[in-house]
Amino acid sequence: MHPPLAILPVTDAALWEAARALRHRVFVEEQACPPEEEWDAYDWPTDQGRTCRHLLGFEGERPAAVCRWRPVEAAGETWAKLERFAVAPEARGHGYGRAMVEAALADARREGHTRFMLYAQDHLRGFYGTWGFQASGDVFWDVGIPHVKMTLEG
């Protein structure tokens, strides 16, 4: 049995480096996402948690999962946009992705958000659907991978 995931907010450069390394491994190396598409102004050190909240999950001492969320304006409403979910290959199959989604939703709800959106890789549509996320619009391609916009209210 694997230990429960200890999920921490990324609040300093050391935690950011661990989160960055995990995202690089999953998105850039494994999924062949161009680095210039992976990193943006919402990442550390540019943002430093001012507008974007990064969460890092540890399996024991090892970083095992990562995600982030940030408030966005869409159709005149404020939404919490959940993004950059990644689980280390050796940590998959233990519910860590589920734990990260639940942590991001709970964190955003604590900040008062009741509307959520994400751009899911299309093969994960059913995974996010377990929380009630519903597809909104057509499948689109991002960095060579089919995605679908999904939303949840409540």
Image: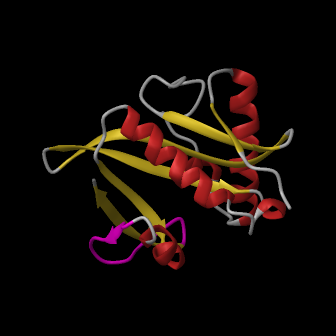
Q: Is residue 106 visible?
A: yes
Q: Residue drawn at (45%, 22%), measured in percent from left and top?
A: 50
Which quarter of the picture shows residue 133?
A: bottom left
Q: Residue furthest front?
A: 1
Q: Residue drawn at (54%, 45%), measured in percent from left and top?
A: 103
Tell me where residue 48 appears, x and y as whole percent: 54, 23
Does the stretch in magenta take in 140?
Answer: yes
Above or below, 45 against 99 in this view is above
Tell me where residue 76 appears, x and y as whole percent: 13, 45
In which quadrant of the rendered image does the N terminus lie? bottom right
Above or below, 128 against 29 in this view is below
Choose between 131 and 32: the one closer to the eye: 131
Choose between 62 and 148: the one closer to the eye: 62
Left or right, 72 with reference to 130: left
Q: Is residue 42 visible?
A: no
Q: Coloured how?
A: secondary structure
Left or right, 115 with reference to 29: left
Q: Residue drawn at (44%, 47%), measured in percent from left and top?
A: 105
Left or right, 129 with reference to 32: left
Q: Main secondary structure of the magenta part?
A: loop
- Start and end of the magenta stretch? 132-144
Choose between 138 and 150: the one closer to the eye: 150
Tell me where residue 74 appears, x and y as whole percent: 21, 48
Does the stretch in magenta take in 44?
Answer: no
